[in-house]
């Protein structure tokens, strides 16, 4: 009887060891979401300092981090959390494009970790980051003071859009105000300019570049067996993208390509996770932007105030609405120069 009880308790112990604890990562900066076993998203929270979304993929041999946040402090927070999880070692960090909110966490990863981008993205980071940081040093403190004053004096509904806008921009300018003190630019040292596979025993991973889109050079991460794509800023969810660094026609071609893939889950560069329909929504935004530019061009106005043009109704509730006038001006200038980019 005693031996039978011992066997039962031993079996119960073994079974209990096989039960995995749920992953619980609490952060004021991002929401940690498990998409599949070994596949995770970190979605920026309002009021937090993540700013962009980040993806994590474990292929069973090595872990890949897709984008690295604006704040090195938040990237360090994520790295510490990953080190406590039962994941394969972090071997790669991918920079989807050159914008500062996707690359400045690079510095917290060890030298053994390769930073991957396209060759052109690496060149732009090396050229532009010193200039950008110098600009932020001079200009970001004033913007921070403005949003800080709004934050301290606000007395309305904290669930209102007005207050959420303050929560969106105040942390952003706080990070930028300190960038010259904290940021040590780490330039990518491994390049993908077509397709590169990082396969492991648990899953296939494809890094894909098709050149210009949101910027001069963009990179996405696609999981063909999981039907998941991490798009960087080629796709936004209910947020106006910043268009003037890109090429609208090639951006649309990028989106058509993504729509040709077998995708069920999309992690955009900004905004919540969604389904493949988000890719079409992003293309429709670009098409509508072009159509508005054509309409303005046909009116042959001598002096257009783009800032005075109201947001289209279907996009009026999207975040980053201050980008719309710049986007429309950019699209108009393309139309006005016979459609060349």
Image: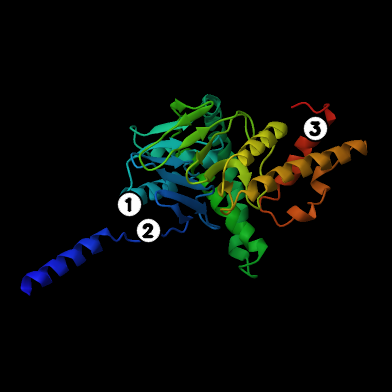
Say left or right for 63 vs 284.
left
Judged by depth in the image, the label closer to the viewer, 2 or 3, is 2
Work out whether mark 1 precedes mark 2 in sequence or the reverse, and give the earlier one. 2
The relative height of residue 137 versus residue 150 in the rendered view (above or below) is above
**Disc 3/disc 1 C-alpha distance (Å):** 50 Å
Q: Name the residue under label 3.
A: 333
Judged by depth in the image, the label closer to the viewer, 3 or 1, is 1
Q: Quadrant of the C terminus?
A: top right
Instruction: Tell me where residue 189 appears, x and y as whole percent.
Output: 43, 26
**Disc 1/disc 2 C-alpha distance (Å):** 8 Å
User: Residue at (58%, 44%) from the top-left corner?
Assistant: 140
Q: Mark 2 points at which residue?
A: 23
Work out whether mark 2 precedes mark 3 in sequence or the reverse, and give the earlier one. 2
Quarter residue 99 falls in: top right
Instruction: Tell me where residue 338 appears, x and y as whole percent.
Output: 83, 26
Say left or right for 134 vs 1.
right
Classed neighbour count for the residue bearing mark 3: other residues with Cα under 10 Å, few (<14), some (14–19), many (≥20): some
SS state under label 2: loop
Q: Name the residue under label 1.
A: 85
Instruction: Tell me where residue 96 appears, x and y as whole percent.
Output: 53, 36
Instruction: Tell me where residue 230 appears, x and y as whole percent.
Output: 53, 43
Say left or right for 79 vs 298.
left
Q: Do the residues labelled 1 and 2 touch (CB within 8 Å)?
A: yes
Q: Which residue lies furthest to the left in this view?
A: 2
Work out whether mark 3 precedes mark 1 in sequence or the reverse, and give the earlier one. 1
User: Residue at (55%, 57%) from the top-left corner?
Assistant: 46
Quarter residue 219 falls in: top right
Classed neighbour count for the residue bearing mark 1: other residues with Cα under 10 Å, few (<14), some (14–19), many (≥20): few
Q: Which of 206 and 164 is in front in this view?
A: 206
Q: Which residue lies furthest to the bottom in this view?
A: 1
SS state under label 3: helix
């Amino acid at each position: 009887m005693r031996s039978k009880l011992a066997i039962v308790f031993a079996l119960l112990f073994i079974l209990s060891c096989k039960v995995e604890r749920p992953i619980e990562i609490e952060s004021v900066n991002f929401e940690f979401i498990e998409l599949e076993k070994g596949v995770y998203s970190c979605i920026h929270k309002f009021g937090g300092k993540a700013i962009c979304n980040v993806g994590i993929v474990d292929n069973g041999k090595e872990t890949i981090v897709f984008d690295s946040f604006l704040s090195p402090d938040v990237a360090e927070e994520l790295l510490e959390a990953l080190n406590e999880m039962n994941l394969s070692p972090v071997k790669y960090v991918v920079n989807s494009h050159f914008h500062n909110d996707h690359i400045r966490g690079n510095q917290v990863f060890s030298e053994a970790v390769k930073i991957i981008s396209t060759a052109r993205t690496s060149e732009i980071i090396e050229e532009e980051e010193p200039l950008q940081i110098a600009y932020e040093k001079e200009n970001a403190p004033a913007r921070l003071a403005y949003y800080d004053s709004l934050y301290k004096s606000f007395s309305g509904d904290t669930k209102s859009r007005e207050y959420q806008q303050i929560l969106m921009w105040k942390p952003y300018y706080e990070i930028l105000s300190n960038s010259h003190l904290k940021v040590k630019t780490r330039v990518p040292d491994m390049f993908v300019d077509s397709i590169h596979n990082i396969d492991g025993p648990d899953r296939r991973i494809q890094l894909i570049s098709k050149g210009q889109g949101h910027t001069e050079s963009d990179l996405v991460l696609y999981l063909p067996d999981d039907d998941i794509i991490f798009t960087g800023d080629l796709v936004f969810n209910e947020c106006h993208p910043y268009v003037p660094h890109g090429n609208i026609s090639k951006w649309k071609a990028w989106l058509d390509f993504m729509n040709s893939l077998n995708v069920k889950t999309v992690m955009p560069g900004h905004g919540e996770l969604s389904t493949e329909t988000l890719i079409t929504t992003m293309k429709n935004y670009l098409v509508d932007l072009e159509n508005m530019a054509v309409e303005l061009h046909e009116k042959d106005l001598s002096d257009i105030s783009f800032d005075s043009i109201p947001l289209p109704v279907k996009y009026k509730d999207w975040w980053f609405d201050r980008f719309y006038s710049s986007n429309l001006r950019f699209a108009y200038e393309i139309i006005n120069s016979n459609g060349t980019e």
